[in-house]
Image (spheres, rainbow, N blue to C red):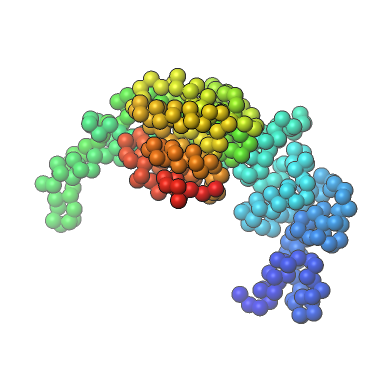
Amino acid sequence: MDKTVQMQRWRLILGQESNDRLTRMEMPALSEEQMLMDSALASIYSKSELGGFGGSGSKGHRPSNPRISKWLGDVRSLFDKDLVKIIQNDAMTRCGLKQLIFEPEILENVEPDISLASAILTLKDMIPERSKDSVREFIKKIVDDINKLLEQDIIRAVTAAVNKREHSPIPSASALDYKMTISRNLKHYSPELKTIVPEHFYFFQRAAVSAAKKWTIILDIDQSGSMAESIIYSSVLSCILASINAVKTHIVAFDTNIVDLTDKCSDPVDLLYGFQLGGGTDIDKSVAYCEQFIDDPKKTLFFLISDLYEGGNRAAFIRRMNEMKSSGVTVVSLLAVSDGREPFYDESVANKLSKLGIPCFACDPKKFPELLGLVLKGRELSETNIKQISRPSSAHK
């Protein structure tokens, strides 16, 4: 990078307040596009009268909707997608624009972002009637993006959970019994090709074929305010699982009350609107409610998605989790389902659960299919590279 480009970038970083000083250092002029960038950034980061609606130049007046719409359009055209999300979030927190996000013409120009969707969900009871369709469409864009990212991997994880005691005549690459196929075809080795040319392939019987509704998957989701991002991901995961015939899925949301959302799993947005982000938590009460869905403990997978801050009876909660695990249920604690963020959770409870053999994970959504596949195949969860909280020294906050 030559000196001219370096100085121009420093000028954009330091903002309009540095203009006079850098000019004395013979700073090269900004290009037309850089001047647009500078103006867009100054709108939220400048502290001087040179700033736009973010600086003192705004004089406390709320900016007009057309001006914000134009600014959002400029930002989206000038910066990379990841930077746009950062700038948008800064505009909401620094410039008091959150109250305007429900304006339809503004929301249409906002880059879909999981953090902004989380903020909207916490305020969804304040959405004006004229904006409900726009808000729903905005959230649907994010849901669709997550669905595209995860759906095929989750379906593959479930349908590839095979019964290795039985074989099937139905060909399936994901259910191929490599060991038997190779051993039974060794005599068909081709010296010319230097490889085995199998005459017959052997396939495991799929779980979906050998036992429909074989697994019960329960997602018990903490709907306290701090879990907003995890709720969005969990809703999409829930709807994908509910669409798979090979498993039976139950979705429960809780704070101090319990809401069974299983019947809303046909639409992730409807499911999201069923959550009431709030205050306290009673995890023990919710786990007790979920016990009614356990018919065959050895074929039940229970996900507790929570920061583990128990507002009810903590000792009873830990005892109930241990009893559930001892009965044969596969119990997993997901401290958060979020993209790359350190989870905020009760370290003491996480460590106690870990000592009982209940794994506590900080789960990137993209890793969830891997985790699900290991469980359904009866593999050890220690085989995954998802961040697991298993010792007091490894806990984060």
Drawn side of residue 42 relative to residue 192, left or right: right
Q: Is residue 137 above or below residue 1?
A: above
Drawn side of residue 14 relative to residue 250, left or right: right
Q: Position of residue 336 (x, y in %)?
A: 52, 41
Residue 51 occupies which quadrant of the picture? bottom right
Drawn side of residue 192 relative to residue 224, left or right: left
Q: Is residue 25 visible?
A: yes
Q: Which residue is at 82% across, 53% downward?
A: 53
Q: Position of residue 6 (x, y in %)?
A: 66, 74
Residue 231 occupies which quadrant of the picture? top right
Q: Position of residue 204 (x, y in %)?
A: 26, 34
Q: Residue furthest left?
A: 187
Q: Is residue 364 above or below residue 11?
A: above
Q: Residue furthest front?
A: 315
Q: Quadrant of the N terminus?
A: bottom right
Q: Which residue is at 47% across, 40% downward?
A: 350
| Closer to us: 156 or 57 | 57
Q: Which residue is at 46% across, 32% downward?
A: 318
Q: Which residue is at 71% across, 54% downward?
A: 75
> How many marks do you count on the picture?
0
